[in-house]
Image (cartoon, grey):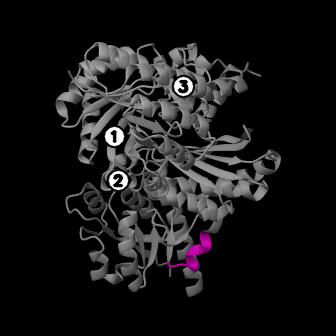
Amino acid sequence: MNQKLKVAILGSGNIGADLLIKILRSPSLECTLFIGRNPDSSGLARARALGVPVSADGIQAILRNPDCCEVVFDATSAGEHLKHWPLLRALGKRVVDLTPSRVGTMVVPAINAHAFHDADNINMISCGGQASTPLAYAIAQTQPGIEYFEVVSSIASLSAGPATRANIDEYIDTTETAIRHFTGCAATKAILILNPAQPSIHMQTTVSAKVATADLDRLRPVIDRMVASIQHYVPGYQMVVPPVFEHNRIVVMVRVTGRGDFLPTYAGNLDIINCAAIAATEQFARGRRTVAA
Amino acid sequence: MKDILISDPTLRDGNHAVMHQLNPAQIAAYCTAADAAGIPIVEVGHGNGLAASSLQLGQSLVSDHEMLRVAREKLTRSQLGVFIIPGFGTIKRDLAPAIDLGADVVRVGSHCTEADTTARHLAYARERGKHAYGNLMMSHMASPATLLAECRKMQSYGAEGVVLMDSAGALLPGDVRERFEVLVGGLEIPVGFHAHNNLGLAIANSLVAVEAGARILDGTARGFGAGAGNAQLEVLVAVLQKLGYTTGIDLYKMLDLSDVAEKHVIKSIPIVRPTSVVSGLAGVVSTFAKHVDRISLQYGIDPRDLFFELGRRKVVAGQEDIIIAAAMDLAHERRPAA
């Protein structure tokens, strides 16, 4: 029997709305409840129009009806997630955290997609973290003696909703922690730029690694494989500046074009974090079926 | 007779001009003289503020902590100012320690349409009992009505004043007048202007702002700042005095301060170079100048073309990484077809 994994989405902002459209396409996930806090929000109206059950009661909707889902995607804010997690854990829910709260195990599908089997709360880091961490990981694997990693992401203003804007400090903290965690390099810096240019710019991420000498021949095939592996779940992920060595730093730059599901294609930042969240959850759903069979 | 509050970012904006290499002795010498001259606020730090020392923007010679410690020691009358851009500096890692070290004035900056990113940082500075101001960068890129809406947000977050930064030195006097007439009429808090001299208008634009009701002005000794530099503070103070405004600054000591700056701090006095003119015309932030010079040389392209290309891409402050991508594209276009 090919039963889909039941999931609820908590948060009806940009991230939640985009996530819903992507989950409706998933062969292994089913959105059984889409939850906001404002009954008149456009996010809820859109979900209703798509035939998805909705609630405007926030976390209460799950507490009242715990059987509605097995997995909860939390697309609210870091502060809200800290309140949600103990309640959801008590219900035995698995949680995919799309806020930069740093509560759960950090997951980048191209590196550790299996983590969801062992952890009941996985954290998707940040949009910039999903774009940069795998590149930093590839650099750290092939270049000894990296002194410092720096990751800079520019995203279109229109793609950054109120929670993203209020959580910039958490974004920086969580992204830096992820780079340290996956590369083992102690010195890291994350920078986020909101760009209001019209037409909106596509999400762009630059990874710089400070190092005395670089072996780009060794790096190139590893980074190409990493990019291809990310493209499996984020089709719009594209390397725009392949690794160059300039000014004692290796620089590589990627652009993320979204599928245009909720916001137009410039909002690659929504795509990359949501596609990563879905990829990790689908992997869990597949593993679970195998065990059941 | 009206009071103008002068804030002096010589040791912050000037850091751009030396790729953020100001050293503790320079900071100490300048702060001592600035204190003697009665400069109300002395801003110190990396050119882009707290935690901006980075490969992206240039790494500081000394840490934020060390810069602030040295300045604090020398400033007795003058207030110590810091600048922070959310997205670079965070409250916990950067702003809280800066206030612990004795910062009195916190300027929180954002691109001119992104004021809501400053809410938490402004509120935090006020909670700590410090003076908090909002800075809107690249203010040539938004209309007066949009700027007013953004300033009102900062006012609602607790800003005691808002400062328009002409980061690219792109505004003409008429643009400045138009902006300040709208802001002064629509806000309850004082407004200020931070000029850049790309088109030779820094002093003139500052005066236009004051005539339209601005009550805060930024200026730097000898104009020491990014690109073509800022409004030259010793000139600004003199002209304001002649016009009957009071700044509380001793003119002779201000002139002495500018000599101290030239002798101890300034590597080369800012002048309006061709790339500054182009960056002003293209509306590209002045801080890109040194990166553009270096990268255009590496890729064998005309820096003027690179500035106009960056202007077309509407890059904002902090997007220095795009310079390489734009340079590669230009170099590629120029290459004869194989």
Amino acid type at image mark 2: Arg
| Residue beneath the point at 44% across and 59% down | A22
Q: Residue at x 31, y 53 (%)?
A: B129
Kindly identify the residue that appears in the image at 30 percent across and 51 percent down: B126
Relative horizontal placement of residue B49, taking residue B163 as reference (left or right): right
Mark 2 element type: helix
The answer to whether A2 appears left or right of A82 in the picture is: right
Q: Taking the image as drawn, is residue A271 in sight?
A: yes
Closer to the chain start, of discs 3 and 1, is: 1
Foreground residue, A160 or A189?
A189
Label 3 in the same subunit as label 2: yes
Q: Residues within 10 Å of mark 1 (few under 14, many from 20)?
A: many
What subunit carries mark 1? B
Residue B220 screen position, x and y as percent:
46, 25
Residue designated by label 1: B134
> Is residue A158 within the magenta segment?
no
Amino acid type at circle 3 is Ala
Q: Is A225 or A245 nearer to us in this picture?
A: A245
* Part of the protein shown in magenta: A113-120
Q: Which disc number belongs to residue B120?
A: 2
Q: Callout 2: residue from which chain?
A: B
A284 or A81, which lies in front?
Answer: A81
The quadrant the N terminus of chain B occupies is top left
Q: Secondary structure at mark 1?
A: strand
Instruction: Work out whether B191 lies above or below A151.
Output: above
Q: CA distance from mark 3 to mark 2?
A: 35 Å
Q: Position of residue B319 (x, y in %)?
A: 53, 37
Q: Amino acid at mark 1?
A: Gly
Q: Is residue A56 left or right of residue A134?
A: left
* Residue appearing at x 58%, y 38% in the figure: B57
Q: According to the image, label 3 marks what residue?
A: B261
Estimate how packed mark 3 is, as few (under 14), some (14 to 19) or many (20 or more) residues with alpha carbons within 10 Å: many
